[in-house]
């Protein structure tokens, strides 16, 4: 009779990917998009994850060495087709004499702006992907076809093509607050698509008790959904302050360029 212990099943760690969407028209530098990406790619995870919401710079989450990166990959996703008709029209020119860069031009600008040389040495891999376009190509087969693929559509596509990956969604503080307040379409599907994990990006000095309260309330809602059964690890939102970030935006750059 064989009394040897049963063989242990080898567990393959799930990849951790942070999704960061932007228009890329144009991508901004260290005081904007590049600074955010560098900070996301520099986050490291400390164990164990406590019950309180973690914050960048706390004993739970930081940018120091000696601990594994929070994300294996920070994935930059230029918008393919905006959800709002007004923004789609503006992207196409919208009656302006100056035609805005198309998707592939914006994609190339992002690849240059977030190249390994531009990002520098960070523990996470930084990549620019065409997942927004692929997600739209997937949903346009519906009858009737939608005008654009939303965030929930994107996550459905990604989970179908990358079943071994856990996703986290990075949003600006204002966008995250709108999401937490239920102002987005299909919020429940988006929450399940990322296992209830978000990053709220905030400027230094702009992380007041209001955002912290939103994060605390949101995390309690995520825990009530018992999302840990689906995705191991933390749930809720991490507030990440980006050193040196300014009010630089794509629209401000366009206005400055137009003014000459």
Image: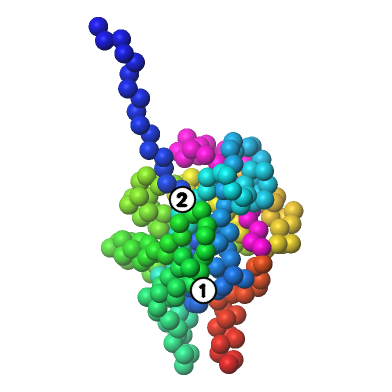
Magenta-colored span: 220-243
Q: Is residue 102 above or below residue 140?
A: below
Task: Point out residue 162 in the picture as x, y percentages from the top left corner.
Answer: 35, 50
Name the residue located 52 percent from the left edge and 48 percent from the top edge.
69
Which residue ends up furthest to the left in the rendered image? 1
**Relative horizontal placement of residue 110, taking residue 223 as reference (left or right):** left
Residue 35, horizontal then vertical, whole percent: 58, 66
Question: Is residue 222 within the magenta segment?
Answer: yes
Mark yes or no: residue 237 visible.
no
Depth order, front residue of 4/246: 4
Q: Which quadrant holds the C terminus?
A: bottom right
- Name the disc covering residue 72, or none: 2
Q: Residue at x 58, y 59 (%)?
A: 39
Q: Quadrant of the N terminus?
A: top left
Residue 190 in picture, x, y percent from top left: 47, 52
Give the camera-side residue of 68 and 13.
Answer: 68
- Residue 107 lies within the magenta run: no
Q: Which mark is residue 27?
A: 1
Residue at left offset 64%, top offset 61%: 242
Q: At which x and y percent is residue 6?
A: 32, 18
Looking at the image, is 87 positioned above or below residue 71? below
Q: Earlier in the sequence, mark 1 or mark 2?
A: 1
Asked whether residue 232 is in view, the answer is: yes
Secondary element at tag 2? loop
- Residue located 35% across and 31% down the image: 10
User: How many angstroms separate mark 1 from mark 2 (CA)?
Assistant: 22 Å
Q: Which mark is residue 117?
A: none
């Amino acid at each position: 009779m064989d009394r040897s212990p049963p063989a242990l099943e080898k567990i393959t760690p799930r990849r951790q990917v942070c999704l960061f969407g932007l228009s890329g028209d144009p991508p901004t530098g260290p005081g904007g998009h590049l600074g955010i990406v560098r900070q996301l790619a520099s986050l490291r995870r400390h164990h164990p994850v406590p019950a309180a919401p973690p914050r960048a710079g706390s004993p739970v989450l930081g940018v120091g060495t000696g601990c594994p990166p929070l994300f294996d990959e920070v994935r930059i996703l230029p918008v393919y087709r905006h959800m709002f008709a007004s923004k789609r029209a503006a992207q196409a020119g919208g009656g302006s004499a100056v035609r805005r860069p198309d998707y592939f031009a914006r994609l190339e600008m992002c690849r240059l702006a977030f190249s390994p040389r531009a990002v520098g040495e960070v523990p996470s891999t930084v990549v620019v992907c065409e997942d927004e376009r692929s997600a739209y190509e997937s949903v346009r087969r519906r009858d009737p076809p939608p005008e654009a693929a939303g965030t929930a559509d994107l996550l459905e596509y990604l989970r179908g093509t990358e079943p071994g990956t856990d996703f986290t969604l990075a949003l600006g503080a204002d966008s995250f607050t709108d999401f937490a307040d239920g102002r987005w379409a299909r919020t429940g599907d988006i929450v399940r698509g990322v296992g209830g994990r978000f990053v709220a990006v905030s400027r230094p000095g702009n992380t007041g008790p209001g955002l912290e309260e939103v994060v605390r309330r949101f995390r309690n809602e995520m825990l009530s959904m018992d999302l840990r059964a689906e995705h191991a690890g933390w749930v809720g939102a991490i507030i990440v302050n980006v050193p040196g970030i300014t009010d630089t935006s794509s629209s401000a750059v366009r206005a400055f360029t137009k003014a000459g």
